[in-house]
Image: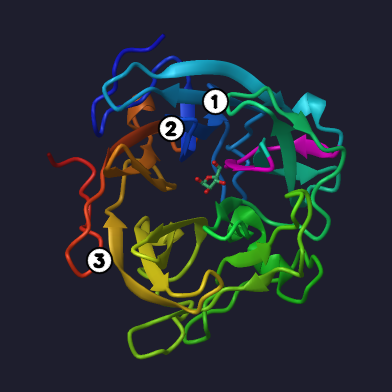
Amino acid sequence: MNKCPKPKQPLVEHMYTADPSAHVFEGKLYIYPSHDLDKDIPSNDNGDQYAMEDYHVFSMDDMESPVVDHGEVLHMKDVPWVSKQMWAPDCAFKNNTYYLYFPARDKDGIFRIGVATSPNPAGPFKPQPNYIPGSFSIDPAVLVDDDGRAYMYFGGLWGGQLEKWQSGTFNPDAVGPSGNEPALGPMVAELSDDMLTFKEKPQMIQIVDENGNPITAGDEDRRYFEGPWMHKYNGLYYLSYSTGTTHYIVYAVSDNPKGPFVYKGRILEPVIGWTTHHSIVEFKGKWYLFYHDSSLSGGVDSKRCMKYTELKYNPDGTIQTIKPYDD
Ligand code: FUB
């Protein structure tokens, strides 16, 4: 059992955790993070330092309760198609079943997205024998909409390989657009009713500025890099994501789950460490941002710790920008 967490402090300190996806299931807050290894691996743009092998699930009865570690719920040795790097997961509930979605490299070194199921939000999760057909890249985030339809958002540049799929097939030499060309966006695909396959071919989401012009690849303060999250507020769809090289969590809004989305602003200023990755959840009448930084390891990019803080909206629905190290 861990101590009661405080806002902007590590949620747990007995292991390194990152990419926290938070959801309210069965009246409690459940968190599905990546599990960073306590190993020193040289960093590169391919992300080799993120060599994670398994997932733990955490829960809190409320924001004043200790964080419970439910232990290892899935290990890559139990997933036949995985070779390495189990990155940022998410969990969704439908059909009386919890679905854990996770990216990992297949036996050819290509990132795919798999799914594992459990009758319990705390797992353990039983993986499907193969990855989701037609899946690629990283960072799945699933929204089960009010009408029961479920959408998966995913994709990440560089180590996450999104730019290598622009032609529709994997091209290891492909590079992304640059300068004034429209930036790549995250992908979206509606999930089948059984939540195990895509109902359709994934399509790229368009993110535009206030004048309707596509955000360009050179606009690194606003363009999509990785870590999509989708939540709804007052009936609108809020797509939030990391800008990667500039280390912001930003957001864009639409009245349609597939966009186009209009860029609105920043949610989180840069944290300690290269990556920034988050989720947004409403719990017991307040909204929270879950995120990570590398403070627990003294700044090692691949040894991160999940944190939370309250997220506030302005009356017009915009989100107040959070400074991670100010009170
Ligand atoms: O944790 C590995 C990768 O780092 C995630 O997939 C990215 O979003 C970044 O946080």
Using the rendered view, name the quadrant where residue 98 is placed: top right
Amino acid type indicated by mark 3: Thr
Magenta range is 81-95
In the rendering, at what x and y percent does residue 77 appear? 79, 25
Q: Which mark is residue 318?
A: 3
Do the residues bearing badges 1 and 3 touch, measured as CB atoms within 8 Å? no
Question: CA–CA distance between discs 1 and 2?
Answer: 16 Å
Quarter of the image for the C terminus: give it.
Answer: top left
Amino acid type indicated by mark 1: Val
Q: Nearer the viewer, mark 3 or mark 2?
A: 3
> Which residue corresponds to the image point at 50% horizontal and 79% vertical from the top-left?
260
CB at mark 3 closer than 8 A to ligand 1? no
Q: Which mark is residue 57?
A: 1
Do the residues bearing badges 3 and 2 touch, measured as CB atoms within 8 Å? no
| Element assignment for label 2 | loop
Question: CA–CA distance between discs 1 and 3?
Answer: 31 Å
| Element assignment for label 1 | strand
Residue 101 vs 13, above or below: the answer is below
Q: Which mark is residue 198?
A: none
Quarter of the image for the N terminus: give it.
Answer: top left
> Which residue corresponds to the image point at 39% horizontal and 38% vertical from the top-left?
292
Horizontal side, residue 315 vs residue 177: left or right: left
| Element assignment for label 3 | loop
Horizontal side, residue 171 vs residue 297: left or right: right
Q: Is residue 89 magenta?
A: yes
> Which residue corresponds to the image point at 72% horizontal and 34% vertical from the top-left?
117
> Which residue corresponds to the image point at 61% horizontal and 51% vertical from the top-left?
140
Name the one closer to the observer, 80 or 62. Answer: 62
Decide: few, some or many residues near mark 1? Use Cα within 10 Å; few <14, some 14-19, many ≥20.
many
Residue 190 visible in the snapshot: yes
CB at mark 2 closer than 8 A to ligand 1? yes
**Circle 2 sits on which residue?**
304
